[in-house]
Image: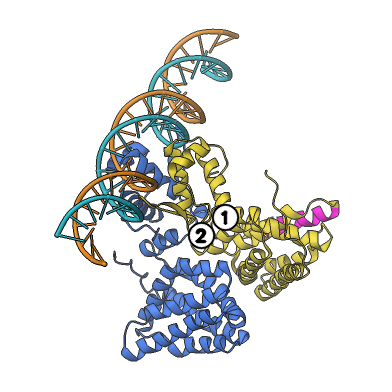
Chain colours: A blue, B yellow, C cyan, D orange
Amino acid sequence: MARSDGQNLTYRIVQALGVAIVSGGYSAKNPFPIEADLCKQYGASRSVLREAVKMLTAKGLLSARPRQGTWVQPEENWNLLDPDVLRWLLERKPSYALLREFAQVRLAVEPKAAALAAMIAPPEAKAAIRTAIDQMAQADRDEDDPLPSDIAFHLAVLRASGNRFYSQLSGVTESALRISIRMQNRYKGVRRASVPDHKKISDAILAGDAEGAELATRALIQEALDLINKADSDGVPEPRKIRRS
Amino acid sequence: MARSDGQNLTYRIVQALGVAIVSGGYSAKNPFPIEADLCKQYGASRSVLREAVKMLTAKGLLSARPRQGTWVQPEENWNLLDPDVLRWLLERKPSYALLREFAQVRLAVEPKAAALAAMIAPPEAKAAIRTAIDQMAQADRDEDDPLPSDIAFHLAVLRASGNRFYSQLSGVTESALRISIRMQNRYKGVRRASVPDHKKISDAILAGDAEGAELATRALIQEALDLINKADSDGVPEPRKIRRS
DNA sequence: CTCGCGGAATTTGTAATATAAATAGGATTA
DNA sequence: TAATCCTATTTATATTACAAATTCCGCGAG
């Protein structure tokens, strides 16, 4: 995994700074430090520190110039669709606004992905969908945590679409789905995901019914979106941070 | 601009390596070089070179380990939605497949963005849409290049949606739109974009007609998608590379 | 007093070198 | 043959030095 595993120093600093930045830890009255200070703060050499800063720059979080120092980019320049950035945001600064916007993305994309999957998914991709839905049902029967198979199902559909951008979203999606679904299930007061609703989607895809898959997916995600809006307007506290792994 | 302006050595190397990677310039028989060789090749110090490699790592293109060297990640790990990565891909290795997949994304997202814009766009956002459509009409009358205002229109709609992910896509979209629209216009044999079709969208948004905006947008983009598929099946040569700026 | 100019100071950019850590691959030995 | 150790290679980290960009301040001319 080339992710920020925290194995080596550079990635640990990327992680720490990335979280601090998206959490709003730097501002006008607490500007982003200069290299020398960051070195002291993290007890790292200038090399590693600069490499970490460069990685965050590549993700649109930072920018630097000689004599002016390094500063946090305005939020609209952040690469929100970078898996790391989105994960940091959702884990450290979850908000109904962000969950709603992400649900809107899902509402736009997943039904189309399901339709494409119904039309062109190769056998292996269909098998992955079938496996996921089976495991969901299994978890439901055993009263296990349905979250992993729920996520796996949505990812499998996105991948089965054969569209590289949709597949890409699945990487972005994993952490977002984790939070969305968890919130959804907690709010509903049940730990069960709605197996029948998911089954409807997979049946349609496996049967090659594009329109049915699209409609069923739209219905499922619309429900999730409605739930977020309801929780928001009901004044339910924002979903809490994820515990450190 | 924190983009790869080519201003300083690091960004020039990021650009050069990024392009080489997405163009498929490295493979089993031509593996990614070790740091020492890259330093010689680009006449750069190890510091700069490592910083450039780290930036590409942050975009999912590379991965490295002691003793094993640095290697190109499988394509499914690339951050396709990173503006740099997508631009490199489209400028250097345009293909109908990629254009089609991107059009599918637009088909999923832009109608929803238009609908949201109709519902909640603040006055400034609506003004931006109005300006863009006016300039399109102007360019049409004057027989100027309609491309810039065409792009501006689509970006304005995405931004007006108030959804940060959609706005994000607009950054990603800019270069993709440039190629898509150019291809579209060239293939149609006209340099004119279809002003009436765009006008229909903006009218609906400005009137607060969400459904109308969604439908009109879907129609426009479906047409673009059909065009790509037709050009592909007609065996029209792939869109050519963009000239160096 | 104001404007412009130049020099000093600060901060990132680049270079060069040295050492540590990880690990693949070969040599050695039981 | 198999387990172990050794060595070579490559990235990871640290340190130092200097270059380049740019702000800021002070000084002098008008």
The chain holding disc 2 is: B
Look at the picture and state if A123 lies above or below B229. below
Q: Are marks 1 and 2 in contact (CB under 8 Å)?
A: yes
Look at the picture and state if A139 lies above or below B55. below
SS of the residue under disc 2 = loop
Spot occupied by residue B233 in the image (x, y as percentages of width and height) = 75, 71
Look at the picture and state if A187 lies above or below A82. below
Which mark lies nearer to you, 1 or 2?
Answer: 1
| A22 vs B190, nearest the viewer | B190
Spot occupied by residue D23 in the image (x, y as percentages of width and height) = 47, 30
SS of the residue under disc 1 = helix
Residue at position x 71%, y 72% in the image: B222
Q: Is residue B135 magenta?
A: yes
| Segment tinted magenta in the rendering | B129-141
Spot occupied by residue C22 in the image (x, y as percentages of width and height) = 30, 53
The chain holding disc 1 is: B
Residue at position x 57%, y 40% in the image: B6
| A6 vs B119, nearest the viewer | A6
Q: Is residue A240 left or right of B219 when viewed as pictured? A: left
Q: Quadrant of residue B124?
A: bottom right
Residue at position x 43%, y 50% in the image: A56
Residue that carries the numbered disc 1 in the rendered image? B22
The three-letter code of the residue at mark 1 reads Val
The three-letter code of the residue at mark 2 reads Trp
Residue that carries the numbered disc 2 in the rendered image? B78
Residue B34 appears in the picture as rendered: yes
Q: Dot 1, how many residues are within 10 Å of its Cα: few (below 14), some (14-19), or many (20+)?
A: many
Q: Is residue A128 left or right of B196 when viewed as pictured? A: left
